[in-house]
Image (cartoon, grey):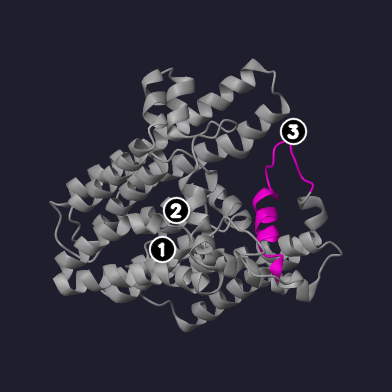
């Protein structure tokens, strides 16, 4: 671990640098917002994409307009995520940096995301070897961190891993539960985490971390149910559970197999609602069956579970790739980290590059083929991550037992 502190003079200098970066972000975004919000290169959203912030803006309209969330104002996201949307909306409505409420919201959103991103980088530099920070410095991570809310569950996941590396298992479970309350994928790593704690501590502590993660995940849902009813509280989960293959994007692993490789049998597999869930559960069980006893082994096992969840899901969103970064940062395997880097780049080639080029040139055969190629490469990279993480766990078993 990278816990040694630099000399006081260096710490002061670093503190000034971080403060400068923290202040510069919102200022630069404010000064350059007019250019940034309209910037496209050849029709491609290279720097800015307003689609998801517009969804967050709509879900938070109860802040200035009134109404009850999930009852009067619908949202496809869990309660904890809506707390973030509401906080940003409140700040933007108070400061009003631009005449447009949406522009003000986007500025506040990207500013808050920038501060969160900086905090994540600083935590990584403090607690992990220097090579881990390069994952966060990948431009694709910055792109999606500023314009999606996935940086928040990724930050909580990083905090969970840091706590686990210090044998603070209950604290780690709390952070995992918070991450899951934002986006459910961390629940898929809880079985591996519980077995990790079982190996490192005992059965009682393993049961405690499982319970804490579950309670923290469920608590916000119960709060919403208390005022809006269970139908409203479970609406986001029903919405995502009902999602199937996207006929427009065609970007899932199944689409890669069907459209690019021409494997028709996969279409029948995807048509069975139970099949994707069984495959996702299989990767969870595979990760847990590795019985990780070190933090790096747990990180690699979790990477298998999360990447499997993404790869076998019927729908795919490019920002999901941020979920892999905290686990890869804790991996001791250079191959795992390289594969995650490659997956990040392949994902950006799909979106926004190929996605927007295809939209701008729908009749171009070359663009359609390029689009399909990026979907296939992105899919293969994800399965490469799973294979590399599995190999990393197996090869690490011959190494001395240590916290990292």
Q: In the image, is 308 to the left or to the right of 106? A: left
Q: In the image, is 77 to the left or to the right of 267? A: right
Spatial CA span between label 3 and label 2? 29 Å
Spatial CA span between label 1 and label 3? 36 Å
Specify the quadrant that holds the C terminus: bottom left
Nearer-the-camera pick, 96 or 24: 96
**Magenta-drawn stretch, dominant element (helix, strand or loop):** loop
Circles 2 and 1: CB atoms closer than 8 Å: yes
Q: Secondary structure at mark 1?
A: helix
Q: Secondary structure at mark 3?
A: loop
Q: Quadrant of residue 90?
A: bottom right
Tell which circle, 2 or 1, labels the residue nearer the N-terminal end.
1
Q: Residue at x 50, y 69 (%)?
A: 225
Nearer-the-camera pick, 306 or 231: 231
Q: Is residue 228 above or below residue 392?
A: below
Q: Where residue 45 sits: x, y (%)?
A: 69, 42
Tell which circle, 3 or 2, labels the residue nearer the N-terminal end.
3
Mark 1 burial class by Cα count in 10 Å: few <14, some 14-19, many 20+: many
Residue 39 counted in the magenta span: yes
Q: Secondary structure at mark 2?
A: helix
The residue lying furthest to the bottom in this view is 8
Q: Quadrant of residue 25?
A: bottom right
Q: Where residue 228 sits: x, y (%)?
A: 56, 69
Q: Residue at x 47, y 58 (%)?
A: 183
Q: Which residue is mark 2?
A: 323
Q: Where residue 73 sits: x, y (%)?
A: 66, 62
Q: Which residue is mark 1?
A: 157
**Residue 42 got which mark?**
3
Magenta residues span 38-62
Mark 2 burial class by Cα count in 10 Å: few <14, some 14-19, many 20+: many
């Amino acid at each position: 671990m990278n816990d040694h502190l630099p000399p006081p003079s260096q710490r002061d200098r670093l503190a000034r640098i971080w403060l400068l970066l923290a202040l510069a972000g919102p200022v630069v975004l404010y000064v350059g917002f007019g250019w940034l919000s309209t910037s496209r290169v050849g029709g491609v959203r290279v720097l800015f994409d307003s689609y998801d912030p517009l969804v967050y803006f709509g879900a938070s309209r109860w802040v200035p307009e009134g109404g009850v969330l999930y009852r009067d104002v619908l949202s496809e996201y869990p309660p904890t995520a809506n707390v973030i949307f509401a906080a940003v909306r409140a700040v933007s409505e108070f400061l009003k940096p631009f005449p447009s409420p949406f522009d003000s919201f986007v500025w506040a959103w990207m500013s808050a995301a920038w501060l969160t991103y900086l905090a994540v980088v600083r935590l990584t530099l403090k607690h992990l070897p220097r090579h881990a920070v390069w994952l966060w410095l990948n431009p694709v991570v910055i792109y999606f961190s500023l314009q999606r809310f996935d940086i928040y569950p990724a930050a909580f996941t990083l905090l969970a891993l840091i706590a686990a590396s210090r044998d603070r298992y209950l604290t780690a479970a709390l952070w995992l539960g918070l991450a899951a309350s934002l986006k459910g994928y961390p629940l898929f790593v809880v079985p591996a985490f519980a077995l990790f704690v079982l190996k490192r501590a005992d059965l009682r502590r393993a049961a405690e971390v499982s319970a804490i993660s579950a309670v923290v995940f469920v608590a916000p849902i119960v709060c919403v149910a208390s005022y809006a009813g269970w139908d409203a509280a479970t609406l986001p989960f029903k919405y995502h559970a009902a999602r199937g293959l996207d006929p427009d994007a065609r970007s899932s692993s199944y689409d890669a197999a069907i459209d690019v490789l021409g494997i028709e049998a996969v279409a029948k597999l995807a048509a069975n609602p139970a099949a994707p869930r069984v495959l996702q559960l299989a990767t969870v069980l595979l990760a847990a069956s590795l019985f990780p006893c070190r933090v790096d082994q747990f990180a690699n096992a979790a990477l298998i579970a999360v990447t499997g969840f993404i790869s076998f899901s019927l729908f795919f969103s490019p920002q999901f790739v941020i979920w892999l970064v905290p686990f890869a940062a804790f991996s001791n395997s250079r191959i795992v980290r390289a594969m995650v880097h490659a997956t990040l780049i392949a994902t950006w080639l799909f979106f926004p590059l190929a996605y927007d080029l295809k939209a701008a040139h729908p009749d171009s055969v070359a663009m359609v083929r390029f689009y399909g190629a990026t979907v296939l490469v992105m899919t293969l990279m994800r399965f490469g991550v799973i294979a590399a993480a599995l190999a990393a766990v197996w090869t690490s078993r011959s190494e001395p037992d240590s916290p990292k």
